[in-house]
Amino acid sequence: MFDGFELAMIDVGAGTLRVRYGGSGPPLLLLHGHPRTHMTWGSVADLLSPHFTVICPDLRGFGKSFQPADEKDNNGSSKRAKAGDCRNLMNALGHDKFAVAGHDRGSYVAFRLAMDFPDIIEKVAVIDSIPIIEHLDRMDWQFARDWYHWFFFAQPEKPERAINAKPLAWYDKIVPDMMGHDAYADLLAVIHDPAVVHGMIEDYRAGLTVDREHELEDRAAGRKIACPLLCLWSSRDDLAVHFGDPLAIWHSWANNVRGHAIDSGHHIAEENPTALSNALLHFFRER
């Protein structure tokens, strides 16, 4: 994976991000979800690199990127802070405008980039997500049953204790079969690092505090994403089951929305990289 890519640690102001980048063509930033690192994009990056300059970082708090200091309001782990890191990363690599795709928690960073920096984001793709407050508006007993981790991770200290006691018991679905042995070894290392576990949990705490507030402010101000938005979701995951048509929800947040389901479980980049790459290629190359 990542054939011909460079691996670097790049200073983004608040700290350093681990990043792989390579390929040729217009810049495309790919953002991972929980508990993954940039390595989740390996197969997709190889398929897209003939058409794009592909940049895959570990977000702050994840992988081998820097850990932000804890703050009472969780601002250090906010998606706004992570979006700022990504803007600084792309500037450091010489890209003043770019496209971005995010999966799972990374999609919230992609969303925040498009919302906060409309002059630099040309197109955005969100994968397996809807805005946080749209989740909470639709919350019912089934959401609480199946997405309980959102609320458990919001609690102080206990989530870290549970995960650090036996990381592979918590992340019991992590196997090397589809992600590849290099990505698996990378992920094993980070989930056994208590500092990274804390950083990943802080991302969820920020989701129900500062990130929620930012989205409420967007809604109250009537702000929408101006650039084209692609919404993709896994047909064998439960996003649409719990929340309805993701496209209809994103139409409330963006002026130009399209999208469809992909035959996959939740980790699409690993389970069906060809279909995902084709969807991203078609969307980002279209003029």
Image (tube, helix red, strand yellow):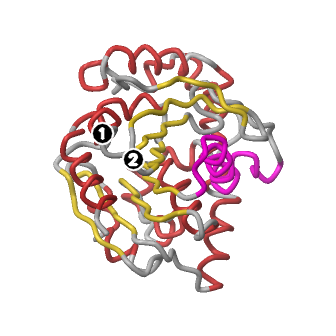
Image x and y of residue 120, in percent: 58, 63
Q: Secondary structure under badge 1?
A: loop
Residue at horizontal 67 percent and vertical 51 percent from the top: 206
| Residue at the image point whose x is 63% and y is 74% from the top | 216
Residue found at x 39% / y 40%: 24
Sequence-wise first label, 1 or 2: 2
The amino acid pointed to by label 2 is Gly
Quarter holding residue 221: bottom right
Name the residue that disc number 1 marks: 50
Up the image or down, 25 lies above or below 208; here it is above
Q: Position of residue 137 (x, y in %)?
A: 49, 72
Residue 130: % across, % down: 43, 63
Q: Which mark is residue 25?
A: 2
User: Which span of residues is magenta-colored?
Assistant: 72-96
Q: Quadrant of the C terminus?
A: bottom left
**Is 92 a magenta residue?**
yes
Q: How many circles with numbers are drawn on the protein?
A: 2
Quadrant in which the N terminus appears? top left
* Amino acid residing under circle 1: Pro
Main secondary-structure element of the magenta-colored stretch:
helix
Residue 277 pos. (x, y %): 26, 46
Is 158 part of what is drawn in magenta?
no
Spatial separation of the CA atoms under disc 1 and disc 2: 8 Å
Q: Residues within 10 Å of mark 1 (few under 14, many from 20)?
A: few
Residue displayed at 55% across by 58% down:
97
Decide if residue 117 is on the left or right side of residue 149. Answer: right
Q: Nearer the viewer, residue 283 or 73?
A: 283
Of helix, strand and loop, which one carries label 2? loop
- Asked if marks 1 and 2 touch (Cβ < 8 Å), the reply is yes
Q: Is residue 25 left or right of residue 105?
A: left
**Disc 2: CA contacts within 10 A as few (<14), some (14-19) or many (>=20):** few
Frontmost residue, 78 versus 38:
38
